[in-house]
Image (cartoon, rainbow, N blue to C red):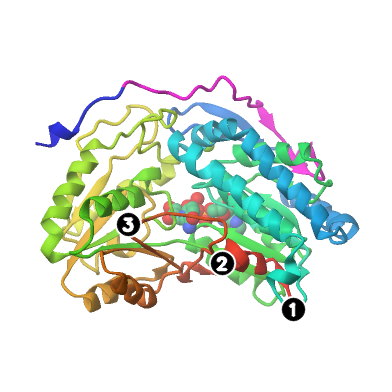
């Protein structure tokens, strides 16, 4: 039955020939790559093959201090005074250079982080360029963006980003900071530092004044040193709720401004009047593509009871056709899990789901023998009290529940510690508006999922964090009035 939907594609690997990686990367401070004072380096690997890709510097507190001082000097001497229209030219140039090097960036993103090339090529890299384009446009129009107020830059922004969208998160953080007139110290995640370092090369080649953007690598202690540095005026963090709480405590009592974008446990809600095939495709896109490594992943599915059997049958069929494997193959839907730690965490949750009594279903696909991979996984007959329903798994694992009435599904969908995003699938506009006002989630997608635009703000409620990125809200987060 399922077989009729399935066929094999010939392998279509993206070439790596044009990719140039150094053996070792230093810290990008004051417009140059400099050796770390720590004298330490650590390796970053390709999670699909286990191959070591490069070594990157491990910044210690003294290195962080140098980076922050470079950012502070660039702020005081150059960037703060530069007219917005001049700042805009640099931001615009960075956007253009990202476009010019798009192929290389996409391949490196997939090699370092494990995400399918289709995703890094069509989503991550173009959106990263678009964020720079978008904010370049605001740099000389701040007083129009915020009429009757006097927007002023903050100073040095310390930015810490995770491994699920390495280049895109760097763009989300750097572009609005520069447009608003701030300088930056950014730290990528330890498993995915390479595209941020490539961005550092682009920034150097763009002629951006030295020290306006500094990019340094390291583990959590490097991030903590950025957060705690007294000359950092603004902290922007995307990552786990656990670290978000540590950061919030660390800056309590200081006048540092902060935005936190943390975890999620989004609900996708399918009503009986929805276009079911599109809805199933949206659900698959929301949780399985990109390995579920998305803070707004639709990891909970609520299906109206009358269509539940149909939807689950269609979902299982679609799961059978998903291709798990080589991230560099253009046919791949689900690439490699980012790290061994993350794969262990996902497998632990799958076991928890089984122990909790939910019914597990996995695609019958094979997964590569080498590297970190996980089959798309469905849990049926789950309930609100299950840990797989309440906690963020950050993997291709979907927990399904059914519902009868709107009131019931709103109550259940909102009844979790998170509130980042949600999806609603229905044919009725009135139902969409009803749902969007009642869902406690920063973003509610209607009849689509995981769609982003630089002009539209993104961020969460409750333990998903606070502050918004993207759009004018994202610009305001880098200004005082
Ligand atoms: P994490 O929150 O530890 O790492 C995110 C970034 O924060 C990294 O750059 C890391 O080096 C840095 N960091 C770690 N400790 C820090 C500290 N004390 N002060 C400042 N910076 C610090 O996330 P991790 O361990 O990689 O993933 C754990 C879980 O977090 C995942 O399984 C997932 O559930 C969630 N997560 C959520 C993300 C999101 O986009 N909301 C992104 C990544 C992970
Ligand atoms: Mg890596």
Q: Quadrant of residue 402?
A: bottom left
Mark sitting on residue 149: 1
Label 3 vs 1, first from the N-terminus: 1
Please tell me whether mark 2 sits on a helix, a strand or a loop.
loop
Q: Looking at the image, is 99 positioned above or below residue 408? A: above
Q: Main SS type for the magenta part? A: loop
Q: Write down the residue under mark 3.
A: 299
Residue at the image position 69 percent from the left and 73 percent from the top: 146
Q: Looking at the image, is 334 positioned above or below residue 21? A: below
Q: Write down the residue under mark 2.
A: 468
- Along the line of sight, the residue nearer the viewer: 264 or 24: 264
Q: Is mark 2 within 8 Å of ligand 1?
A: no
Please tell me whether mark 3 sits on a helix, a strand or a loop.
loop
Q: Is mark 1 within 8 Å of ligand 1?
A: no
Q: Start and end of the magenta stretch? A: 10-38
Q: Quadrant of residue 224?
A: bottom right
Give how far across and how far down residue 450 sits, in percent: 41, 54
Please tell me whether mark 1 sits on a helix, a strand or a loop.
loop
- Horizontal placement of 274 versus 93: left or right? left
Q: Quadrant of residue 172?
A: bottom right
Q: Residues within 10 Å of mark 2 (few under 14, many from 20)?
A: many
Give how far across and how far down residue 147 sits, in percent: 71, 76
Label 2 vs 1, first from the N-terminus: 1
Q: Residues within 10 Å of mark 1 (few under 14, many from 20)?
A: few
Label 2 vs 3, first from the N-terminus: 3
């Amino acid at each position: 039955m399922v077989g009729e939907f399935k066929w094999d594609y010939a392998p279509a690997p993206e070439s790596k020939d044009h990719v140039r990686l150094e053996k070792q990367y230093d810290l990008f401070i004051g417009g140059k790559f400099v050796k770390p004072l720590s004298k330490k380096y650590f390796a970053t690997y390709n999670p699909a093959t286990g191959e070591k890709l490069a070594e990157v510097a491990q910044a210690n507190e003294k290195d962080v201090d140098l980076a922050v001082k470079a950012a502070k000097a660039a702020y005081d001497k150059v960037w703060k005074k530069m007219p917005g229209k001049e700042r805009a030219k640099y931001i615009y140039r960075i956007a253009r250079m990202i476009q010019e090097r798009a192929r290389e960036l996409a391949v490196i993103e997939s090699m370092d982080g494990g995400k399918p090339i289709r995703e890094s090529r069509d989503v991550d890299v173009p959106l990263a360029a678009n964020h720079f384009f978008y904010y370049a446009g605001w740099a000389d129009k701040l007083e129009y963006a915020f009429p009757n107020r006097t927007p002023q830059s903050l100073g040095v922004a310390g930015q810490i980003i995770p491994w699920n969208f390495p280049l895109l998160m760097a763009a989300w953080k750097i572009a609005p900071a520069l447009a608003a007139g701030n300088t930056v110290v950014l730290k990528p995640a330890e498993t995915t530092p390479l595209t941020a370092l490539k961005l550092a090369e682009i920034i150097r080649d763009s002629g951006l004044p030295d020290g306006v953007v500094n990019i340094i690598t390291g583990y959590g202690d490097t991030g903590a040193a950025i957060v705690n540095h007294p000359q950092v005026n603004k902290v922007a963090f995307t990552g786990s709720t656990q670290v978000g709480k540590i950061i919030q405590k660390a800056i309590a009592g200081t006048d540092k401004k902060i935005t936190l974008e943390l975890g999620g446990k989004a609900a996708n809600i399918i009503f009986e009047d929805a276009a079911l095939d599109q809805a199933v495709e949206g659900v698959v896109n929301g949780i399985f593509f990109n390995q579920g490594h998305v803070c707004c992943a639709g990891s909970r599915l609520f299906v109206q009871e009358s269509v539940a059997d149909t939807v689950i049958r269609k979902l299982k069929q679609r799961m059978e056709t998903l291709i798990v494997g080589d991230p560099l193959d253009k046919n791949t839907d689900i690439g490699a899990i980012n790290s061994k730690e993350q794969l262990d965490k996902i497998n632990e949750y799958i076991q928890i789901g089984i122990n909790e009594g939910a019914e597990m279903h996995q695609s019958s696909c094979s997964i590569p023998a080498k590297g970190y991979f996980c089959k798309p996984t469905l849990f049926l007959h789950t309930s609100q009290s299950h840990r797989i329903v309440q906690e963020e798994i950050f993997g291709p694992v979907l927990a399904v529940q059914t519902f009868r009435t709107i009131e019931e599904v709103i109550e259940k969908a909102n009844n979790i510690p998170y509130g980042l995003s949600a999806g609603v699938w229905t044919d009725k506009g009135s139902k969409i508006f009803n749902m969007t006002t009642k869902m406690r989630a920063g973003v509610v997608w209607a009849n689509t999922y995981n769609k982003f635009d630089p002009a539209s703000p993104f961020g969460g409620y409750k333990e998903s964090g606070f502050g918004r990125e993207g759009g004018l809200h994202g610009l305001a987060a880098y200004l005082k009035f």
